[in-house]
Image (tube, grey):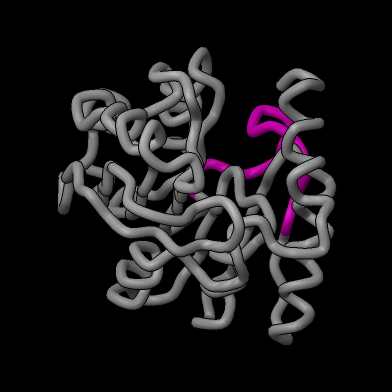
Amino acid sequence: MNDLWTNRWNDRYSANEFAYGEQPNNYLKEQLEKLPVGTILFPAEGEGRNAVFAATLGWAVSAFDISTEGKKKALQLAAKNNITIDYEVGSLEELQYTHEQFDAIALIYAHFPAAIKSSLHKALDKYLRKGGIIIFEAFSKNHLAYQAKNENIGGPKDIESLFSTDEIRSDFANYEIIELVEKEIELNEGLYHNGKGSVIRFVGRKK
């Protein structure tokens, strides 16, 4: 991951306020509350709102991001909620997760650079046990039209960094699809996700 990308996220997370709020993403909350607790990984977890929520439910939480400022905020939020999370800074290939370590992986607005997003999805697979669950929500390729009307909704501005249902089917080809849908939703998440947007939502079970 290049320095420009890292600096962008360190700048965003260095403010006192939480960029996307302190409350969990609604879709993640809805899906996690259906599952028995276990081990869960949060890639690109930023300031930790989703990881901290999972830990309050009793999950054993691991998270990573490229931003040291994100980690600081995440640990601050964890302390505020009297829980602990394992939070690493680095890219996936640098970290020491083990084969089939996790019962679930949550990708919530994990918009990796376009050149690596599909390969990273496929690389994550080996860390999920057979029968484990992927929970995914991120902006769809149709989201650009929503951005044109309302820049406060946030999200990447290049179509290659956005998602389609076909891409998700391809990236997670060895998963039973529990839900895969493109949907218009209303977001109210901190400073940077506000208004109507178009998202892909996916829940899959590893075969």
Residue 130, placed above or below residue 66:
below
Indicate the quadrant containing the C terminus: top left, top right, bottom left or bottom right. top left
Task: In the displayed orientation, state which residue is furthest to the top.
Answer: 115
- Which image quadrant is residue 86 in? bottom right
The picture places residue 97, in percent across and down from the top left corner, at 63, 44
Is 110 within the magenta?
no
Asked whether residue 138 appears in the rendered view, the answer is yes
The picture places residue 1, in percent across and down from the top left corner, at 71, 22
Asked whether residue 205 appears in the rendered view, the answer is no
Is 93 within the magenta?
yes
Residue beneath the point at 80% across and 71% down: 76
Residue beneath the point at 39% across and 55% down: 195
Residue beneath the point at 20% across and 47% down: 183
Residue 107, placed above or below residue 91:
below
- Horizontally, is 161 left or right of 87 in the view? left
- Horizontally, is 124 left or right of 48 in the view? left
Q: Nearer the viewer, residue 178 or 195?
A: 195
- Horizontally, is 147 left or right of 123 in the view? left
The picture places residue 131, in percent across and down from the top left corner, at 28, 53
Number of marks drawn: 0
The picture places residue 169, in percent across and down from the top left corner, at 21, 30
Residue 85, placed above or below residue 5:
below
Task: In the displayed orientation, state which residue is furthest to the bottom.
Answer: 82
Q: Which residues are magenta?
A: 87-100
Residue beneath the point at 83% across and 51% down: 14
Task: In the displayed orientation, state which residue is furthest to the front.
Answer: 149
Residue 10, placed above or below residue 62:
above
- Which image quadrant is residue 186 in? bottom left
- Horizontally, is 96 left or right of 204 in the view? right
